[in-house]
Image (cartoon, grey):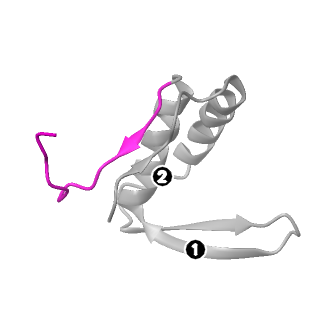
Amino acid sequence: MSMMVVSGLPSEEDITLAKDSCRQLSLYLSSKEEVTAIRVIDQAGEHEAVQIPTSAYRLLIDILAQMGQGNAVRLIPVHAEIMTQ
């Protein structure tokens, strides 16, 4: 897996949206479940339930919390090699 980067600082609109979505998603976080189901709705109104690991759901909430504070976010896989260059 390669490094994934959210380039640049979030815009004011992104900050507001991240704060709101972080708050809303946090309401549905369960510490007892290993899998979380979310419903994805496209612009045509079609929707599908998608199951993701609860650990990934927590990570999404953490990312949104950071963006809500105006921070850029970078994800680096734990197994990525650390280079001196």
Q: Above or below — where is 12 with respect to 45?
A: above
Outermost residue to the right: 44
Among the 4 quarters of the image, the one containing residue 39: bottom right
Estimate how packed mark 1 is, as few (under 14), some (14 to 19) or many (20 or more) residues with alpha carbons within 10 Å: few
Instruction: Kindly state the secondary structure of the residue where label 1 is placed.
Output: strand
Q: Position of residue 58 (x, y in %)?
A: 41, 50
Point out residue 53 in the picture as x, y percentages from the top left corner.
40, 67
As shown in the figure, which amino acid type bears the numbered disc 2?
A: Leu
Residue found at x 30% / y 50%: 76
How far across and how far down the image is residue 29, in percent? 48, 52
User: What's the magenta bit mostly, secondary-structure-wise?
Assistant: loop
* Nearest to N terminus: mark 1 or mark 2: 2
Residue 76 forms part of the magenta stretch? yes
Compared across the picture, whether 42 is left or right of 73 comes to: right
Residue at x 88%, y 69% (from the top left corner): 44
Q: Quadrant of residue 56?
A: bottom left
Q: Residue furthest front?
A: 85
What amino acid type is highlighted by mark number 1? Val
**Residue 50 tag number:** 1
User: Is 7 left or right of 83, judged from the image as shown?
Assistant: right
For the residues labelled 1 and 2, the Cα–Cα distance comes to: 15 Å
Q: Magenta segment range?
A: 71-85
Q: Which residue is mark 2?
A: 29
Task: Decide: is 23 above or below 83.
Answer: above
Quadrant the C terminus occupies: top left
